[in-house]
Amino acid sequence: MNEFSLIEFIQLVIFFGLLIGLTPVLGNYMSKVFAGNKHFMLPVLGWLEKYTYKLVRINPTEETNWKTYTINLLLFHSAGFTFIFLIQLFQAYLPLNPANLSDVSWHSAFNISVSFITNTNWQDYAGETTLSYLVQMIGLTVQNFVSAATGIAVLMALIRGIFRKTTDRVGNFWIDLTRTTLYVLLPLSILFSIVLVGQGVVQNFKPYEAVQTLQGTQQVIPMGPAASQIAIKQLGTNGGGFFNSNSSHPFENPTPFSNFLEMLAILLIPASLTFTYGKMVGSVRQGWTIFATMLFFLVAGLSISIYAEYSANPIFGHLPLMEGKETRFGITNSVLWSTFTTAASNGSVNAMHDSLSPVTGMIAMINIMLGEVIFGGVGAGLYGMFIFIILTVFIAGLMVGRTPEYLGKKVEAFEVQMAIIAVLAPAFVILIFSAWAAVGNNGLSGINNAGPHGLSEILYAFSSAAGNNGSAFAGLNVNTVFYNITLGIGMLIGRFGVIIPVLAIAGRMAEKKIIPPSSGTFRTDNLLFIGLLIAVILIIGGLTFFPALSLGPVTEHLLLRIGITF
């Protein structure tokens, strides 16, 4: 296709119409689940929830303060890391390994384990040639569920901190984790898996099959339980591919319809949680305000990306850039996916991001660098946006000379300090670690391109790790000791360096009294606040990352216009 077509415009209208229409439906259901109210899945799975509490000896009526909540969260993921790490090291001796794959190296096992417990799903490996069915299912797929559930659990603790008063209780991590998994992620994943199988996504335990091609050569076709992992990887904003080529693989994403549904699944829960937020804090308008802010960034980034891909370089004869795109879906659907997957902290890809135009690649990086708050990961995007809300309210309070407030709670020094830590933690990883890789042989040895594009490859990798996104330019060889360790550390800082300050804010907010609104209260549910929030996000992101971006994609774009490539 040489230009953006009417049918693609109609697809966009249908997509955003469905996203906006489904947001209150799923959002209202989730508000009932997390508030402990009756819902239609309770008679179906309520028995399993009760049995789970009994099995692990949890009192469903007991709640904890934010410190205990945090400790439980960290202990849970420490156990998850240890388990995944060990089954990779001993993979060759475990069952469900029909391809007889060998054990995974210690540094790759470290990276993979960290990647999946942090909901990053960064992959330095090809799934079909590295990990057995057992590791993929009992290790990675399980973490796809519980790491996503953790993000939503942290959001629930934050919401309770906002609407509760004069208490130190923010909920129970184990209950939030269980309810999210049983009532939200599991039913949606089962339903979506069935749909995907109907579209042609494989779901079996067969050994790999050798077939004869039309050219008369033999090719090994990978099999496996893919559909069950694809469903949760999209719905849980995980993104890790069962196969190496991820969502461009015909066994993961076989049809245009599956492509559409998988893109919708990426944004569905993060978008719906804005409505859940509004319902639970007592103001649906607040939820729609956040939704509108996220939608603005998504549409703006998407528009720029589509324009950049169809406005080809005159050096190439003004032809659209098809290199690296999935020809089954075309330029528009490749760009849609690159925008949605980086906006939603998903990380799956249906095209080669390394082949995107410099501007489109920059938009993908910016989506991640802004803190993955453009819908973001399930739960994580919304509590990341709350960090910027705290900073926006604080700045607005300074401008009018009034103590900052949000939903009747005073925003004081502690909350602002925690918000700044949450902003700086991922930024530190992105800038410092990228600089480290760009000046040393360990980092430079892995790049595929020289010049600004090589810097973009490094910058994108550490942005993806710190933002817990998981996508990559893929021109960078990261399966080395240096990158496996540094990226793994970056994922940990990017995940828990934000979660801990957010839970600290939740605990402090829960202790405060609720102040009745007055004529001087700064409203946080109107267009003025949306504009101010957008400005704060752009200013913080611009001041932090523009110098690095100017050396990478901006310079590459300018040089490409005069025919200089690397």
Image (spheres, rainbow, N blue to C red):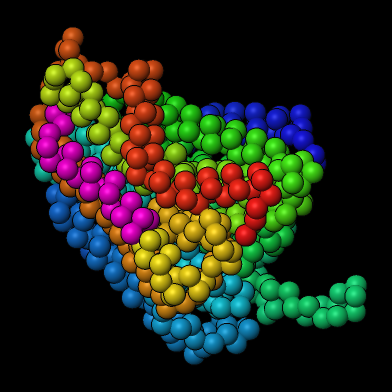
Q: Residue at x 21, y 56 (%)?
A: 70
Q: Residue at x 60, y 33 (%)?
A: 303
**Magenta part, dominant SS:** helix
Image quadrant in which the C terminus is located? bottom right
Examine the rendered structure and indicate whether residue 207 appears above or below residue 557: below
Q: Residue at x 37, y 65 (%)?
A: 436
Q: Which quadrant of the figure has residue 528?
A: top left
- Residue 450 position in % (x across, y down): 56, 63
Question: Is residue 18 visible to us here?
Answer: no
Question: Is residue 273 visible to us here?
Answer: yes
Magenta run includes residue 418: yes
Of residue 492 and residue 234, the one placed in the foreground of this image is 492
Of residue 339 and residue 311, the one placed in the foreground of this image is 311
Of residue 340 and residue 308, the one placed in the foreground of this image is 308
Left or right of 52: which side holds 138? right
Of residue 563 and residue 164, the one placed in the foreground of this image is 563
Specify start and end residues of the magenta stretch as a single range.
Answer: 407-432
Examine the rendered structure and indicate whether residue 387 appears above or below residue 76: above
Q: Residue at x 41, y 71 (%)?
A: 440
Image quadrant in which the N terminus is located? top right
Magenta run includes residue 415: yes
- Residue 256 position in % (x across, y down): 73, 47
Examine the rendered structure and indicate whether residue 364 appears above or below residue 464: above
- Residue 234 position in % (x across, y down): 54, 52
Left or right of 128: which side holds 118? left
Count of residue discs: 0
- Residue extending furthest bottom? 93
- Residue 236 position in % (x across, y down): 47, 52
